[in-house]
Image (tube, coloured by chain):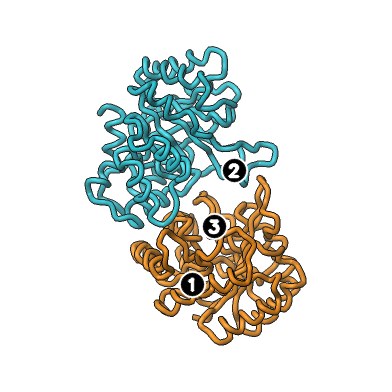
Amino acid sequence: MTDTAIIDCNANLGNWPFRRTSYNTPDALLERLARVDIDRAWVTLLDAVMLKNVGAANPWLAEMVAGYEQLMPVGSVNPTWPAWERDLAECADLGFRGVRVNPNYHGWTLADPIFGELLAAAGEAGMFVEVALHMTDERHHHPLVMVPPVVVDGLLDACAAHPTVPIVLANVKNAPASQLARDADGELPGNLYFELSHFESVGGVQAMADALGVERILFGTHAPYYYPESSVLKVFEECDFSAADLAAITHQNAERLLGE
Amino acid sequence: MTIDCHVHLLGQAEGPLERGENLLRHADRVGIDIMCVSLGRFGGYHDASSLEKVAGNNAEVQSAVERWPDRFIGFCYLNPCYLPQSLAEIDRRIADGPFRGIKLLLDMFCDQPNLDPIAERAAELGAPIQQHTWIKQTGNYPLESEPRHLVTLARRHPDTTFLAAHTGGNWELGIREIIDTPNIIADICGGDPEMGYLEMALPLLGAERIAWGSDAPGRSFASQLAKVHGADVPDADKQQILSGTMRRVLDL
């Protein structure tokens, strides 16, 4: 489908509790992504979102991806739990380059001081922080587990206070991304990145790249919850990016974020 | 061939033809040949529909259909609260051309008696009725129909073809609700490109009862095409869903 190297910055392993999940082992995921010419992915563990003891997911994920050089594990941290710093440190010890947080599932907001504490700790460990704004369509949640999306209020202040810590918004839709661009009034923080799997509307990825800056856009699929074809078709067929922009979106921005 | 059964003449541009051009430019890039289009930008999308709003939206759509008759197929928007005027609009836009189908949105639960004369007239004209349906755990709009409402209507009118737009959004529920009502076709447009949609729908409905749509321009053509291109289903079924079902429904 493409002749451009693609890094999927938003793929998942493991199980989501409300739907049988396919292609959720390392071999199966890599095979599924390879169908659309993706051969490298950052992966989180879906199970981590609903675990009470989120930190238990990290050695589990490390064990799953051991030996799979194409998969880069992203850990999970719930900073409202006691001794969360130990989980972050364990992620660093395991060689993880970043951690994901799910503030809505874990009962905190980006305006809470705990977010700043997490960013500071991640910065000291040389890790990026990924914020998943939601996981699935809120309109269709299990009736006993309804979780509103993460509100981005407070995010720009947090970015400014921790300018050396890369912050990735995963599963971010057009509206909160546009809100941040408006709130930033011209220049978004240099350490803020947007993963594109949830950008919608006809030509929407191109419009968001124009609004946010192509240098902040990371290719992601949200596979295997989403069909990975969605992001590939959006970027390579529906939009009309230059070769330079395609290279930035599909791998260069991710490599810069990692300092490679 | 790819037929998009669910497109709106929306977008940033002021004029309907400019919005049509934008749709066509992107449709061409992803290989969509024909788009069934309804609803322009006349009046707020979710506001109660006055007769002026109905006529204004249909006029916008008709301008695009007349400009690109090989690419757009018009679906006539109606507010069934205004029944005599709705029947007159059907005659004006469908019986006299160029529209081919009916679009119903949020103005009345679709199991109400006002829908009966509309469904009967649609059957006489061979015009499918596309009814918006959604099942929201977060709460529907006040008069927003669910697939179960459409099932009630469709069983009263077995000779009329209905498109359950979005298949209720919450597709695991919506697919099940329409299983036993053969004159309802699942319009799989809108919603996220979640893996498993067609893998569930196909064995329960059959490809002949599934039609691909996008809900563009609010949705990306690409994200919606992924539901078919990415599904683990036979290629013949994919082609049926991408075009065969609507070719049959519209006798193309």
Colour displayed for chain B in the image of the structure: orange
Q: Between residues A156 and B3, which one lies in front from this camera angle?
A: A156
| Residue contact at pointers 3 and 2, CB within 8 angstroms | no
Residue B215 locus on image (x, y percent): 50, 60
Q: Residue furthest left?
A: A244
- The image quadrant of residue B2 is bottom left
Chain under numbered label 3: B
Choose mark 1 or mark 3, whichever is in front. 1
> Is disc 1 surrounded by few (<14), some (14 to 19) or many (20+) residues within 10 Å?
many
Q: Quadrant of the N terminus of chain B?
A: bottom left
- The image quadrant of residue B146 is bottom right
Q: Is residue A139 left or right of residue A87?
A: right
Residue at which label 3 appears: B198
Residue A204 locus on image (x, y percent): 40, 52
Residue at which label 2 appears: A138
Choose mark 3 or mark 2, whichever is in front. 2
Disc 1 marks a residue whose amino acid type is Glu
**Which disc number belongs to residue B60?**
1
Chain under numbered label 2: A
Residue A158 locus on image (x, y percent): 43, 24
> Is disc 2 surrounded by few (<14), some (14 to 19) or many (20+) residues within 10 Å?
some
Question: Residue shown at 62%/52% (left/top)?
Answer: B170
Q: Secondary structure at mark 3?
A: helix
Q: Secondary structure at mark 1?
A: helix
Disc 2 marks a residue whose amino acid type is Glu
Colour displayed for chain A in the image of the structure: cyan
- The image quadrant of residue B33 is bottom left
Pick whichever of labels 1 and 3 is earlier in the sequence.
Answer: 1
Query: How much space separates mark 1 and mark 3, taking CA atoms?
Result: 33 Å
